[in-house]
Image (cartoon, grey):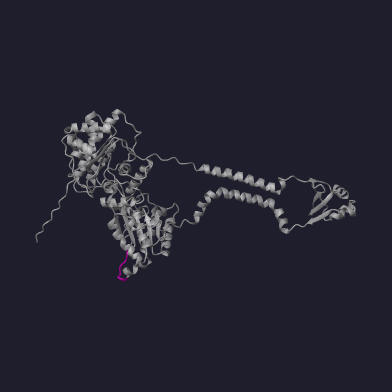
């Protein structure tokens, strides 16, 4: 039921809490599997060895030397093979037996001494096999060497899982950046692939020109910026722009994240920084790109983000490397962050990151160009109008728009259609903003009625207040964590908001709470998110924006509750008395907005009932249906007004 807050643009909502963590698979199972496999292999190898050395074959019968002499004398023996002192005897019937001869004595002499006649001895083929030195030593050492080899193989097989980690001990100091070769057409990105951000691309075009033709700048005494800091919200295309600079200039692109510099071992981060810069210098001209540089570039000595000596050593090494660049090295460092306020002043001073490029959220024209880029490889239906989609997505970043197009294609594929239609794009907007529909989450009759009045209260108050955005859609179908939602979008993009707009937004957020209380005489847990959002907004009005008459034009808190100018603590910098006055001003703003919403709900109760009844029946009201209900009850819907700019006359 809660209408929610804006996050990155109108209509976006903040979730009620993090999802439960995914269960981790036990890592010990793989060890026991490897151990069992190794034991089985060891047994198989031992069995194979025993088989080949003779245990697997039938052993010939042993006979005494006297028995051999008698058999030879009777003409039963066909041949005798002498291998050292071992005798292999083959009889006339092809049977085999074995025996031993006397050491240091010839076999023929021994047989003659046992009474074998010379004629019978000449009828037997005697073959003396001479053993080589290699065979001798192999036979002597094989019983010792082969078990040792089996044990070594067993140890290697068990340790192969951790051998890679052990070898990394010798490469801790290597940076291992991701390198994009300029000749790799599959990964190459140019400015044509990045829509919007016109001013940012204009700033970066100079860098491309320097990398292509540095002599033009050096001859006139100009020095290209050593470092370029890309600042902007998440998903605005900072990494894509950095890759586009490398693609336009045709130079290698070394990309690494700030978190990859820091390890648990002291000095590793600084060593990786040195290795990264040395690698880039060998490939110059080149671009080094450090993503999320605030991971190592935070203000030193404050403990912000759990600072430690290793992180500060890494930052110091980055400062030294950037300060040591010469103009003719043709290596440019680019970095991206969405928290420039926490960076160390030494990092952003002239001579290091001395050019800052701000990348803002795209306006309607830029959003249209971004949508066209992401629609290149998607078959669109004839009814698709990307201008309407761009108009309905204020506050969307480039990443949001890419996700929107992808979700639309997924919806079309799920329904076995070959093209993406306008209806798919409209549905994907709400899916990106609020989450997927939860039609299985069925409300009972009472909950459905409460949700309908809650959302009707939001929509009615938003339609009456002059400085609130117009309502585009109302729904009581659950999406994400919300049981229902009211989608309101501005007629045009805004970069600033005024005090009157904030006050109307707070009153609109209270519309659902007031409607529940007035209609049912009770309130539910539904408006909890609304109350959190409007309370935070009212406090920001007092402490950040100077919109309180009593507190005056004083900024008592910085962004995210941080102290201003990097003083390094998150605590309050005002007295308890001022804190009490802030609380009183926040309550005054909220009470005034509550009374404003209550007056609207009371005066237009019939319109509220009609909107809620229509929601119960249809579950969703589009803008045209909603405005028709307003007109029926004497309320004029909001229309886009043309702004006329009059020239200013200046008298001299």
559 shown above or below 453 = below
Mainly helix, strand or loop, the magenta region? Answer: loop
Of 166 and 598, which appears nearest the observer? 598
Of 26 and 264, which appears nearest the observer? 26
Of 4 and 192, which appears nearest the observer? 192
Q: Residue furthest front?
A: 382
Query: Residue 365: where, in percent of width, then height?
Result: 26, 52
Query: Residue 448: where, in percent of width, then height?
Result: 29, 31
Query: Residue 372: where, in percent of width, then height?
Result: 31, 51
- Magenta stretch: residue 112 in it? no
Q: Quadrant of residue 334?
A: bottom left
- Magenta stretch: residue 220 in it? yes
Query: Residue 649: where, in percent of width, then height?
Result: 10, 57
- The reply to whether residue 384 is visible in this rendering is yes
Q: Is residue 531 left or right of residue 407?
A: left
Q: Specify start and end residues of the magenta stretch as a single range.
A: 219-225
- The reply to whether residue 347 is visible in this rendering is no
Of 95 and 132, which appears nearest the observer? 95
Q: Is residue 593 left or right of residue 475?
A: left
Q: Residue furthest bottom?
A: 219
Residue at 33% across / 62% down in the picture?
Answer: 207
């Amino acid at each position: 039921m809660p209408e929610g807050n804006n996050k990155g643009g109108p209509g976006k909502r903040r979730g009620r809490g993090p999802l439960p963590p995914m269960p981790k698979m036990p890592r010990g199972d793989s060890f026991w599997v490897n151990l069992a496999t190794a034991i089985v292999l060891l047994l198989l190898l031992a069995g194979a060895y025993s088989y080949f050395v003779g245990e697997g074959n039938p052993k010939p019968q042993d006979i005494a030397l006297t028995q051999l002499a008698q058999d030879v004398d009777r003409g039963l023996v066909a041949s005798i093979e002498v291998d050292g002192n071992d005798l292999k005897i083959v009889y006339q019937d092809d049977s085999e037996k074995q025996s031993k001869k006397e050491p240091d004595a010839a076999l023929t002499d021994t047989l003659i001494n046992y009474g074998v006649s010379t004629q019978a001895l000449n009828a037997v083929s005697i073959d003396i096999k001479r053993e080589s030195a290699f065979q001798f030593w192999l036979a002597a050492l094989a019983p010792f060497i082969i078990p040792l080899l089996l044990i070594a193989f067993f140890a290697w097989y068990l340790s192969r899982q951790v051998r890679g980690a052990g070898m990394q001990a010798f490469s801790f100091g290597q940076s291992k950046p991701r390198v994009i070769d300029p000749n790799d057409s599959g990964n190459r990105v140019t400015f044509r692939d990045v829509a919007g951000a016109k001013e940012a691309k204009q700033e970066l075009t100079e860098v491309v020109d320097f990398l292509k033709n540095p002599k033009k700048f050096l001859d006139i005494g100009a020095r290209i910026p050593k470092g370029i800091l890309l600042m902007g919200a998440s998903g605005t295309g900072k990494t894509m722009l950095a890759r586009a600079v490398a693609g336009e200039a045709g130079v290698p692109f070394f990309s690494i994240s700030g978190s990859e510099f820091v390890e648990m071992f002291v000095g590793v981060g600084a060593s990786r920084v040195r290795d990264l810069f040395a690698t880039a210098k060998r490939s110059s001209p080149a671009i080094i790109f450090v993503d999320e540089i605030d991971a190592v570039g935070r203000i030193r000595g404050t403990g912000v983000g759990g600072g430690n000596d290793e992180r500060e050593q890494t930052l110091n090494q980055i400062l030294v490397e950037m300060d040591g660049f010469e103009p003719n090295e043709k290596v440019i460092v680019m970095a991206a962050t969405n928290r420039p306020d926490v960076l160390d002043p030494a990092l952003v001073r002239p001579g290091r990151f001395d050019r800052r490029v701000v990348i803002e959220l795209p306006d309607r024209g830029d959003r249209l160009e971004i949508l066209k880029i992401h629609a290149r490889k998607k078959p669109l239906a004839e009814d698709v109008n990307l201008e309407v989609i761009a108009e309905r997505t204020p506050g969307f970043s480039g990443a949001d728009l890419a996700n929107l197009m992808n979700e639309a294609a997924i919806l079309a594929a799920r329904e076995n259609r070959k093209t993406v239609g306008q209806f798919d794009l409209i549905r994907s907007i709400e899916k990106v903003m609020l989450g997927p529909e939860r039609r299985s989450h069925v409300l009972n009759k009472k909950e459905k009625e409460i949700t309908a009045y809650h959302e009707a209260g939001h929509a009615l108050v938003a339609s009456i207040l002059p400085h609130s955005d117009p309502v585009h859609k109302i729904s009581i179908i659950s999406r994400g964590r919300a049981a229902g939602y009211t989608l309101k979008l501005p007629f045009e993009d805004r970069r600033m908001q005024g005090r009157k707009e904030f006050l109307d937004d707070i009153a609109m957020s209270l519309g659902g709470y007031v409607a529940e209380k007035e209609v049912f005489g009770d309130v539910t847990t539904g408006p909890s998110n609304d109350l959190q959002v409007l309370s935070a907004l009212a406090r920001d009005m007092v402490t950040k924006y100077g919109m309180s008459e009593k507190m005056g034009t004083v900024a008592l808190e910085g962004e995210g509750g941080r102290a201003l100018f990097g003083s390094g603590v998150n605590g309050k910098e005002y007295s308890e008395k001022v804190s009490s006055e802030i609380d009183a001003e926040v309550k005054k703003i909220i009470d005034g907005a509550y009374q404003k919403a209550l007056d609207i709900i009371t005066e237009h109760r019939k319109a509220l009932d009609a909107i809620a009844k229509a929601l119960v029946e249809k579950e969703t009201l589009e803008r045209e249906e909603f405005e028709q209900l307003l007109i029926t009850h004497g309320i004029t819907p909001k229309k886009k007004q043309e702004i006329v700019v009059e020239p200013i006359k200046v008298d001299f």
